[in-house]
Structures are given as C-alpha cells and as structure tokens.
Image (tube, rainbow, N blue to C red):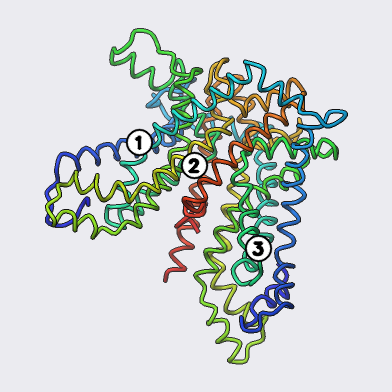
Amino acid sequence: MIGAEGQRTGPGTIAVLAVAAAVLVFLIAPVAIIVIVSFSGADYLTFPPPRLSLRWYARFFGTPEWRRSIVVSVQVASLTMVFATVLGLAASLALVRGRFRGKGAVYAVLLSPMIVPTIITAIGLYFLFVKLKATGSILAMAMGHTVLALPVVVIIITATLQGFDLRLELAALSLGASRLTALRRVTLPLIAPGVVSAALFAFLTSFDELLIPLFLAGVEVQTLTVRVWNSLLLEVDPTIAAVSSFLIAVTCAVLGASALLRRRTDV
Amino acid sequence: MKAEEIAVVVAPTEAADRHDTRRYLLLLLPALLTLAAFFVYPLLGILLRSVYKSGYTLESYRQVVSTSVYLMVIGLTFRTAAMVTLVALALGYPLAYVLATVRPRLGRVLVVIVVLPFLTSIIVRTYAWMVLLGRNGVVNQYLVAIGLTDAPLRLLYNQAGVVVGMTYVLLPFMVLTLASVMRGIDPSLVRAAHSLGASRWQAFRRVFLPLSAPGIAGGTLLVFILSLGFFITPALMGGPSDVMIAMLIEREVEFTLNWSFASTLAVILLVLTLIGFVAYYRLMRLERLFEGLG
C-alpha cells in the first residue's frame, strides 16, 4: 500500500501516483480554467487571460434576460428543494423505522428516477404537460425536478436516520417528554444537519439540471441552464464563462455548507 | 412535514403493530403519489405511445429494426459508450487506488477534487471542454504556440471530442464506485502477501486486483449504462454524424414531431438501461456513490 511503513517506493508506485495526479489535474483543470477565463478582459477566451476584468460578469448580471433566468432557476430550485425535502423526509422516516413488507421494492421505486435516463423522464413530462397545457410553468419544472431530487434526498436522509440512535428518543420519552417534545428537542436537532444537507443537494440538483426545463421551458420562462444551452448552440460566447463560474460557485457553496454540517454532526 | 406525523413515527418499536404500519404507509404516500403522477404515469404514456397508433401495433418497432440509419445510431451509441467506459476505467482505477490507500485525511481532500466536477452542472462541464478543444481553444493555442502543429487541429465536433467530454463527465462515477470498493479491502491481506514473499506487483495482481473486481464490474457497468442515455455532451461536442439514441429521441420530439417514434426509441433505451441496472444492482448499491456527501 502506498505510504505503508517500511516499504520502499518502487517505480510502479511512482507510476501509479503520476497517473493519479494527472487524472486529478484532468478533473479539476477544466473547471479551474473556466473560472479563470471568466475574469478575462480579452474579447475571446485565451488562457491565461492577457488582462483581468469583470466585463463578462457585467454582461451576465447586466442583461435582463440573464437576470430573469437566474430568478427562474432560483424559483424552480427552491420549490424543488421544499417538495423533495418534505416528501423525502417523510418517506425516509417510514423506510428506516417502519416494518412492512415490500420495503425493498418501495426503496427501489424511490431511487428509480436516478436510473431512468433523464431524457426519457423529460419527454414523458413534456407529453404530459403539453396535454395539460402547462409547459412554461415554474411549477411544472419544479415537479419534474422534484422527481429527480427525491432519490438524492432519500439516500442522504435514510443514511442520517440510520446513524441516529433511537434510544436517545426513547430516553427522552421515558423521562417524561411528550412525543412532540422528544421530536422537537431530541430527534430533529440531531438529524437536522442531514436534512439541511439533503435540502441543499435537492436545490443543486434542480439548479444544475438542463433537460427537464429544456422541454418544459417557455419562451419567457427559461432557467439559467436552458439559456446556456441556447447560446451554446449558436456560438461559444465568453459570457457563458461567467455564467458557468456562477454555477460552479453555487456548487462549491453547497459542498462547503454540507461539509460544515457534517463536521458539526461529528463533534 | 407535519409534526403529528413525525410524532407517530417515534413510537417505541415494540408498539409497532398493524396500526403503526398503516401510519408509516401514510408517510410514504405523498412521495409515492408524486412519483406515480410525474414519473410512472409519464413513462407509461411513453410506453403506450410506442405501441398505439389508432390501434395497437408494433409498427414503429419494426421500423426501427429495419431502418439502417436507426441501427447505425444504436450501434454508434454502444460503440461510444464502450470507448468512454474503457477510458474511464483506465484513468479511474489508478486514481481510485490512490484515493483509497493514502492516509484518510489526504484522501478526504483529494476526493473533493473528484466530487466538485461530479456535482457541477453537466452543461458547464461540457462548455469547459468546448472552450478547451475549440478551434481557437486553449489546447489549440498551446499546440500552435509550441509548434506541434501549424494550423489548429479539429478537436471538437467529432467522435474524439464526444469521448473526451463524456469521459470527463462520467469519470467521477467510476472513481467513486471503485474507491468505495477499494476502501473495503483489508490492507492486512496485501501486507500478508508481502510477508509471504510476494513482490508489490504480485501482491497487487493476485490479492488487491481480484478483491477490487466488484468495483471494476460495478463502475464499468454504471458508466456504460449512463453513457447509453447521454444527451447534452454528444449534442454539443459531436459532429453531424455523431448521433446517439438520446439525441435522436430529442430530434423526433422537437423537430420531426413524431412522438410515437420518439417513444419507441425511448422504450428501447429504457429497456437497455434497466437490463444494465439489474446487473449493476446485483453487484452493488447505488447509494454507495453518495457515501460521505450527507
């Protein structure tokens, strides 16, 4: 094993480390380069940028269409977060604590949206909402994203609940707490980090997703990802680098917040 | 989440009886109804459209099987998926090995480098590669600058571009699957092999590699299945002839407006995917990918 004591570092180990390092660079470089060139002051994207500026961010946040699509994305993602977390929390409680037959099957059904290619879910919803004359609605997009986010929420919250010691709650009950008090004062505070983390990932799932809004968006109501898609079909516009960096920043924020939450739980 | 509902759930387990079971099912109901309305029902709609055209018929399936263009698309989809899977395995295995065997604290830092792109929007990751590989892209600027080529190379809008982009998007799935299996391998087994006189290579090949086989199978299968249904990356990075099944489905819906045919293709893709996942599920559970996220 690498780093194990008392072993010489052979050429094989060095080769493995070199490949691993190269693959890490391969993974992080494109993301890093996009963030760097988004601050470019040049007219087209060169790396490294000859001079720095915020012009592409000015273009991004200064264009009404882009601003509107931020609002749409936040609306869709917020609704998705609320729906998926509420539905997922309830379902997870039942899955972890309930004793009933067919639990495995229910679990599989709840995770299945992760398995079905999103393009299929997207066209299925498109056919449905065209029939209902509900395309272009924020709610329709949020329902589609709730389906996609539900597996993520269920996975995270069931893992949290499995780590929760039921005896703590029973202790509260035996010390005279009502069920509601035990829930409010013992259970919820203990599983809260997991639930919040699940909610954040639900938000991110929606915020980053393209295919559902691609089919369900209207001319006026477009998410950020749909607007990125539409402009990429035309040309590689440097503004997209700023938009992308914004999306990357949201991902980093969610990752960072969930890491902080996890650290708090560990203490 | 209504407070009374949770309160019910916290009942001591010994009191779990039929009454309780019903309450639990009540908690499941909202999620299951939502999935029924916005997932299962639309999928059934697709299935119905694929076989119903003023009467039940398998006409559109027959059309897919007998039209060479569609067979070519399916073949190309499989070929692309296979190439992406192989490249991802070749790149992913060494990285997963290092992630799983370095000191845990360092491993946690390095895994962030895998997870950050994993959680970044696919369209952002695809755009990043379009910037890198474009005609005036970063890679071409450097190739010309160091004199490896006189004119910019055509790195984008061809199959190579698609494979690079898709591998980039799917590599984290491979790495995380492999690493989760490798972390479960008892290091003392490898040490035992060493103490019995095995060289590093022998210990790896005869002990570690076979023990990591479930990860190889799982990661390979997962990346292959996800590749089959890929849309965004091949649509943006491929050339006119690099059409994959998912792109064909989108075209039939958006441009040709042939919904029954789009549905037929969707059902074919879905069946292929489900077969793959049944095999995958026998090897490992999907939620292992999310270890450490929650």
Distance from Cα at disc 2 to Cα at disc 3? 25 Å
Q: Please name the residue that numbered disc 1 is placed on.
A: B91
Does the CB distance between marks 3 and 1 fall below 8 Å? no
What mark, if any, has residue B74 been given in the picture? none
| Chain at tag 3 | A
Label 2: few (<14), some (14–19) or many (≥20) C-alpha neighbours in 10 Å: many
Q: Is residue A262 above or below residue A19?
A: below
Q: Nearer the viewer, residue A247 or A191?
A: A191
Does the CB distance between marks 2 and 3 fall below 8 Å? no
**Mark 2, secondary structure of its residue:** helix
State which mark lies toward you, 3 or 1: 3
Residue A263 lies left or right of residue A89; in this view the side is left
Kindly give the residue lying farthest to the top in the view shown: B150
| Chain at tag 1 | B
What mark, if any, has residue A102 been given in the picture? 3
Q: Nearer the viewer, residue A216 or B67?
A: B67
